[in-house]
Image: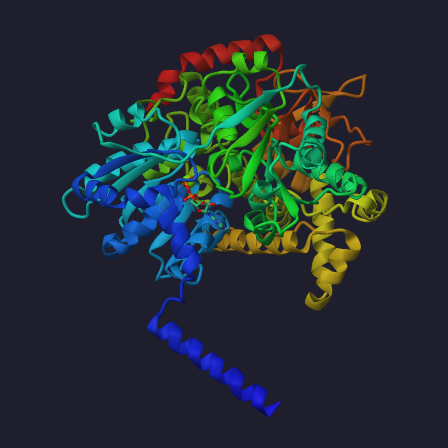
Amino acid sequence: VQLQQISNDKINDNNNLKNQLEIPKEIPKEIKLQKESLPVFTAKDALLKNFKEHSTVIIISETGTGKTTQIPQYLYENGYKDNGIIAITQPRRVAAVSISKRVSQEMGVELGDQVGYCVRFDDKTNEKTKLKYMTDGMLVREAMLDSSLSKYSVIILDEAHERTLNTDVLFGLLKSIQKRREKKNPLKIIIMSATLDAELFSQYFNNAPVLYIEGRQFPVQIYYTEEIQKDYVDAALITVLQIHIAHLTDKSINKEEEEDGGDILVFLTGRDEIENLEKLLLDRIPRLPVGSKDLIVCPIFSALPQEQQMKVFEKAPKGSRKVILATNIAETSLTINGIRYVVDSGAVKSKIFNPKIGIDSLNIIPISKASAKQRTGRAGREFEGKCYRLYTQETFEKLDTSSIPEIKRSNIANVILQLKTIGINDILSFDFLESPPVASVIKSLELLFCLDAISDNGSLTELGKKMALFPLDPMYSKTLIKSIEFECSEEVLIIISILSVESIFFTPKEKKKEVEDVKKIFFSPDGDHITFLNVFREFQKSKPQQQQQWCFDHFINLKSMIKVLNVFEQLVKYCISLKLPIVSCGSDFDRIKKSFIGGFFLNTAILQPDKKYKTMVDNKEIQIHPTSFLFDQKPQHILYNELTITTKAFARNIIPIEGSWLAEICPKYYGTRLTKQQQQQQQQNSIQSIDTFKN
Ligand code: ADP
Ligand code: MG
């Protein structure tokens, strides 16, 4: 025991010394070789020369060239860190987290020191951080606090081709910040994109130079289905299994080549589909024919715990094959080595705003030709590959050429609120790369007006200023502020924290029935939100050392619960700093429901005689999603947080409400809303009142 003690101390001493001197860890030779073998390496000098000579540079290259991982390191090694932080924005949090982790390994430093990441509710940076991978949304938020973004010397807008709403907003913000900082503290802007349409970016930044880096691309054989597939998850299952056992009968397949990299990448639209296919595959794996390799199923989507996300990058052991089930995160954001086969569902989940009624829904829609091409490309990065498109060639020919930028199809209420906080009042004349449609600007302004975030002349109200400070969508921040009036902020904070992690339940494939029984313990007829609250309260009752067991017994995901606690603590801090009191309503749940009406009054529906629902704002048929605890209850009036449209429209996270509360809580919207005719009149008026909103 004594000896052990001494050696432990020694190790600690060494570590301390190492930390003090900041000696980076030894970098393995293979990492060095891998870095130098990337196509971007040969362009290093040319890149640095251009960075020196121009304030804005646009870089175009295929996915997997090494842009995201290497270019920030080149900047770091060549003095750019001395004037400030180098930020790299990503549209998705998974990419920001996993890429920063990789880069910290490549540089031999601890993640969170010189290299860190910052995503909503999770900031892993410190005063030493010089390479900061962050979501584009976080950088917009930072601009609200420091409108010159003065601590950054270089800002890289990565994945610019994705044209997310936040990246589009950053284009406008950075352009004006760069101009403002020109003399005193110049800002370098680097735009990185995986598609060739760079002209738009270059023109926008006063003809900034465009650098093309040639990637490596091997030929990929494309296969289409002969008929239209009704169920692409099922089609994906069959295709994956066929690829997996092909070598048993097809002698032309080179087994040695496949040993080096024969992994399959399947593109689906979201967590439900991924988990569904995972289950189907796991059911079939034990029954694979003799002589097949092992098949390792690796799902990747944003709600998955980090360690599991990292599993997709681990090389499959000899004699086995990985099948990666991904959302379009793997289209261009993450490069996974070893892929030889791609299976493409042809679909993507996309947020779509209906400017007629003013609400967002998540729709599963066909991808664009550009996306299909990107997905195919993932099979040919290291060797010749194959891509199985689960749709017909005719369907492919009919796809749109490229996807519609988010700003043209999405709710921009949040953007408007943020821009107004930064001091940009006139949204319609903001220097956007491409402007949002006037109809959605009007509808989003109307929503903010009904939420009391802006006054009738378009300026931010006191309430609006508070709402903008929370890292939440305006409908959630309004709910939270409303909960203070209804004296139930503690409960609403808990519920919003739970809603922010997607799912706290964990359903092992083989125990579905048991899970259903256990879930009943928490069930509340007052709706999903109160059911979630019950879970949280019970979880809080168990002692820290018992929590793991408690979660296991109740089919709750412990990691998700820890995340919920963390989000809750952060939101509480925001409330304290804004002097908003945190009070509990005990079991008076009506207060919670009323608070949610304050934010989500547009997301309401009424029960019909056929047991389906019709939305109150536009009389569209929707159904309660089967995962909701109210699926069998069918209350008269419901409020929902989310609408997903596949072949049907499903509402999720439901609360039963009283119809009479609507006019009481939202007189601006429901007070005057008596007949269809009056509604139309109101719409007419709002279009005429665009001038009022314009300033
Ligand atoms: P680009 O941004 O041009 O698409 P990246 O810089 O993302 O390219 O990727 C460069 C290389 O880094 C790829 O070969 C990729 O496989 C590798 N890489 C990225 N993240 C990881 C990781 N977590 N583990 C192993 N390799 C990784
Ligand atoms: Mg990249």
Residue at the image point whose x is 57% and y is 10% from the top: 678
* Residue found at the very far left of the displayed protein: 183
Assign ligand 1 to one image quadrant. top left
Residue 543 lies, in percent from the top left, at 71, 66
For this view, does 214 lie left or right of residue 255? left
Query: Which quadrant holds residue 83?
Result: bottom left
| In the foreground, 240 or 487 | 240
In the foreground, 594 or 184: 184
Image location (x, y in percent) of residue 363: 59, 24
Q: How is the image coloured?
A: rainbow
User: From what the image shows, is residue 58 above or below residue 102?
Assistant: above
Judge whether 579 appears above or below 39 on screen.
below
At 33% across and 56% down in the image, what residue appears?
130
Instruction: Name the one closer to the observer, 478 or 177.
Output: 177
The structure residue drawn at horizontal position 38% and vertical position 35%, both measured from the top left corner, is 215
Extreme residue in the front direction: 251
Q: Give the quadrant of residue 628.
A: top right
Asked whether 372 or 119 is in front, the reply is 372
Relative image position of residue 311 (x, y in whole percent): 59, 50
Query: Can residue 450 be spotted in the picture?
Result: no
Give residue 618's quadrant in the image.
top right
Q: Is 689 on the left or on the right of 547, as rendered?
A: left
Image coordinates for residue 548, horizontal then vertical, percent: 71, 61
**Quadrant (top left, top right, bottom left, bottom right) of the N terminus:** bottom right
Q: Is residue 413 visible?
A: yes
Among all residues in the image, which is located at the extreme top? 677
Q: How many marks?
A: 0
- Image quadrant holding the C terminus, namely top left
